[in-house]
């Protein structure tokens, strides 16, 4: 595995765009093919829209791919105050309405899937199909203890914000457990879209650790079942295979399947919570088949 940060070069690159929706300026990557059905992709907490690059390059053959940055991530606004997923769900719904996206398809990883489900609930009938990857369907408080939550919040808040260079982040992060199995293009995308260069040449994380911690804290006590009504269209949930992860016969997942108009779940038998970034070929195969089938 390369130990050098190097931007991925490709003839197909997205256009960086901004739009005002739900009171904030939201940043997104537009991959073109505007006459095709729209496909809105939303990243997980702490990441950015660029991690979807290997997916967008392929899916843009059949879809108008849009990769959105959640509030407090990438170059989307970072307003002061609390950060919670219900607010981001409203952001996504407002984004969809502002761009007047119809016959919409969606892909979300982890919390990106959750806020996509929320937007689908808020705009019934707007989405045609949604593919979720490692989205937690259960209430988070049923999965971890308060002590485990506090430990995670402390680890998150202690993350280093400013670095000498992207190369320094690459060397520090690339072999960590969370990132070591990521495909190179998604990891480089995380560095490209998840950091900014300061005036003195150093780089800063675009999702501050305190913002990331706010999201984790508010997710812990959140009741998600209320967003599982009005889910029209088709849904696919892909699960990784690791200790402590969700399983296909989890009662919460079975309840979600009952509440949604048409939903199915598949355990991929590989990967961690970062399944789509670790196994893009396998995940993309399942997602493409689902999105393109009649």
Image (cartoon, grey):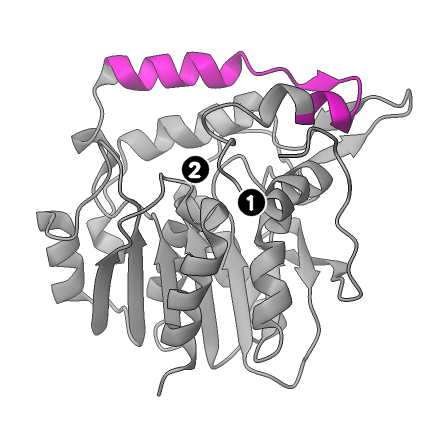
Element on which disc 2 rests: loop
**Image position of 115 (left or right of 246):** right
Image spot of residue 73 (x, y percent) = 61, 39
Is 153 a magenta residue? Answer: yes
Image spot of residue 139 (x, y percent) = 21, 39
Element on which disc 1 rests: loop
- Disc nearest the viewer among 1 and 2: 1
285 vs 248, nearest the viewer: 285
Q: Is residue 292 visible?
A: yes
Mark 1 or 2, nearer chain start: 2
Q: CA distance from mark 1 to mark 2?
A: 29 Å
From the image, which quarter does the C terminus lie in? bottom left
61 w.r.t. 251: above or below: below
**Image position of 122 (left or right of 198):** left
251 vs 3, nearest the viewer: 3
Other residues around mark 2 within 10 Å, as few (<14) / some (14–19) / many (≥20): some
Tell me which residue sits at (72%, 41%) in the image. 192
Give residue 42's mark. none
For the stretch drawn in magenta, what is the main secondary structure? helix
| Among the 4 quarters of the image, the one containing residue 235 | bottom left
Image spot of residue 65 (x, y percent) = 60, 69
Q: Is residue 128 visible?
A: no
Q: Which residues are magenta?
A: 147-170
Labels 1 and 2 touching (C-beta < 8 A): no
Direction right: furthest residue? 200
Tell me which residue sits at (22%, 66%) in the image. 264
Tell me which residue sits at (24%, 38%) in the image. 245
57 w.r.t. 176: above or below: below
Where is mark 1, residue-wise?
183
Where is mark 2, residue-wise?
84
Image spot of residue 129 (x, y percent) = 38, 73
């Amino acid at each position: 595995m390369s130990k050098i940060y190097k931007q991925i070069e490709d003839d197909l690159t997205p256009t960086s765009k901004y739009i005002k929706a739900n009171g904030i300026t939201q940043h997104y990557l537009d991959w073109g093919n505007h006459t095709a059905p729209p496909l809105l992709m939303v990243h997980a907490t702490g990441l950015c829209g660029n991690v979807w690059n290997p997916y967008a390059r392929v899916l843009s053959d059949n879809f108008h791919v849009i990769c959105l940055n959640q509030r407090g991530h990438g170059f989307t606004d970072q307003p002061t105050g609390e950060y919670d997923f219900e607010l981001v769900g409203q952001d996504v719904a407002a984004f969809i309405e502002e761009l007047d996206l119809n016959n919409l398809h969606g892909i979300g990883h982890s919390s990106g899937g959750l806020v996509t489900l929320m937007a689908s609930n808020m705009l019934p009938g707007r989405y045609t199909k949604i593919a979720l990857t490692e989205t937690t369907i259960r209430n988070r408080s049923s999965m971890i203890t308060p002590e485990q939550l506090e430990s995670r919040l402390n680890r998150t808040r202690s993350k280093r914000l400013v670095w000498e260079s992207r190369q320094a982040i690459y060397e520090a992060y690339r072999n960590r457990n969370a990132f070591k199995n990521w495909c190179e293009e998604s990891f480089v995308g995380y560095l490209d879209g998840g950091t900014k260069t300061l005036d003195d040449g150093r780089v800063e994380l675009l999702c501050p650790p305190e913002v990331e911690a706010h999201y984790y804290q508010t997710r812990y006590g959140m009741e998600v079942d209320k967003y599982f009504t009005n889910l029209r269209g088709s849904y696919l949930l892909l699960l990784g295979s690791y200790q402590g992860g969700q399983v296909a016969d989890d009662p919460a997942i079975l309840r979600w399947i009952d509440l949604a108009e048409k939903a199915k779940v598949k355990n991929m038998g590989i990967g961690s919570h970062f399944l789509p970034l670790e196994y893009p070929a396998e995940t993309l195969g399942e997602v493409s088949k689902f999105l393109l089938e009649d």
